[in-house]
Amino acid sequence: MAALLGASAVLFRALPARVEVCAPGAGGMNSAPRRKRVAIIGAGPAGLAAAWDLRYAADIDVTVFEKSKGVFGRAATRTRHGARLDPGANYFRTDLPDIASMVLSQLPADDLVEIAGDIDVFDRFGTISAGDPSLNGEKKWTYRQGINTLGKLLAAATQCEIVFGTKVGGIQRISRSRSWEVVDEGNRRCGVFDAILLALPAPQAMALLPADASVCAGALAPATYQSQWSFTFAFDGTASRWPGNAYALINEDRQHEFAWVSRENAKPGRMPEGMLVVMAQMQPGWSLERFHSDAGELAREVSNALAEFFGWNSAAFHWFDSQRWKYSLPTGRADTDQLRAMEATGLYVAGDAVVGKGRVAQALQSGLDVARRIRDSA
């Protein structure tokens, strides 16, 4: 596993150096005339799953464009004060057969770990009760080094080009052809492709569409998103106690300021000894009102609210980390029938916009499904 992740890290460092890809006047990166050229915009779960599925297609070349320096979108991981944190997606399930095969059989699984403990629920008054037994009976998965390990494993296995640090500014249909051109935000050409897969939040996908793609824009419009603040705190493990053996608590009626509170120590091998590490993801309404507020001031407000919620005598924390997500939680689903009709033009969409909710496994599945349709059309 370490060797594989090391190899993928080399891949990640090397590829961004290909700055000539988006140089003015550049053509497609893959010039073989008889191979279908596919551009995937977004290296989140859906985009990487599609690239991974297309890896053995003998007649398809794939290029993934990612604006950031890393992979897996809101299923992100980072290190703070010796702790590995997942400030977005908390875990994933393998209840879908394709995802179970991918995660448990086809990708390295020696770093894969199950999160112990149930997910209980609480109401607007903070009253905690047992969660759904059927849902708690399903395994919750992550990796010792963080949930984005899955993204790194997929990226390392894709055998395609992943271009980091390139923010796509738009796509344009080339007249009198079935091809699409990708340009970056500086309007520099990034290549000509036979098919485009938009694998990013619907508002960002809509911003890339040309004026003559109004049908696609209309199909994406129902996929709206809510914003969310996420905070992680390290409390003294002796002074701050977690109630019971649950891994996490979720607000069932969506009337509390906390949407989700979790004990990150339940993730094996992640947290420093002697600390109780708690993640609090705030309700969208709370988050929207404070979206541009100072993170440090909000951290004090949230830690005080946690102390009150759990009945602690002190809200003091050793350190905190925060993440502000503009497009965090999908609240609607795109018109998938219209999107499927658009595929005849070589334009595809995958991700939580077509799922209608934020679920890692379903986003992965949407990428696999689209990739199979791209293969069938080649």
Image (cartoon, rainbow, N blue to C red):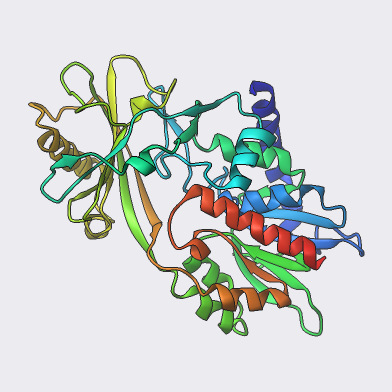
For this view, does 110 lie left or right of residue 130? Answer: right
* Rendered-image quadrant of the N terminus: top right
Q: Can the viewer see residue 322 in this picture?
A: yes
For this view, does 282 lie left or right of residue 223? Answer: left
The residue lying toward the viewer, choosing from 4 and 22, is: 4
Q: Can the viewer see residue 42 in this picture?
A: no
* Rendered-image quadrant of the C terminus: bottom right
Vertical position of residue 62 compared to residue 92: above or below: below
Number of dots carrying numbers: 0
The residue lying toward the viewer, choosing from 162 and 56, is: 56
Q: Residue furthest front?
A: 134
The residue at 81%/85% (across/down) is: 176
Q: Position of residue 235 (x, y in %)?
A: 23, 25
The residue at 65%/78% (across/down) is: 341
The residue at 65%/59% (across/down) is: 369
Q: Position of residue 226 (x, y in %)?
A: 35, 61
Q: Position of residue 288 (x, y in %)?
A: 26, 60
Q: Hey, which quadrant is residue 290 in on the image?
A: bottom left
Vertical position of residue 360 compared to residue 193: above or below: above
Q: Position of residue 183 (x, y in %)?
A: 67, 66
Vertical position of residue 170 compared to residue 323: above or below: below
The residue at 61%/28% (across/down) is: 109
The residue lying toward the viewer, choosing from 176 and 256, is: 256
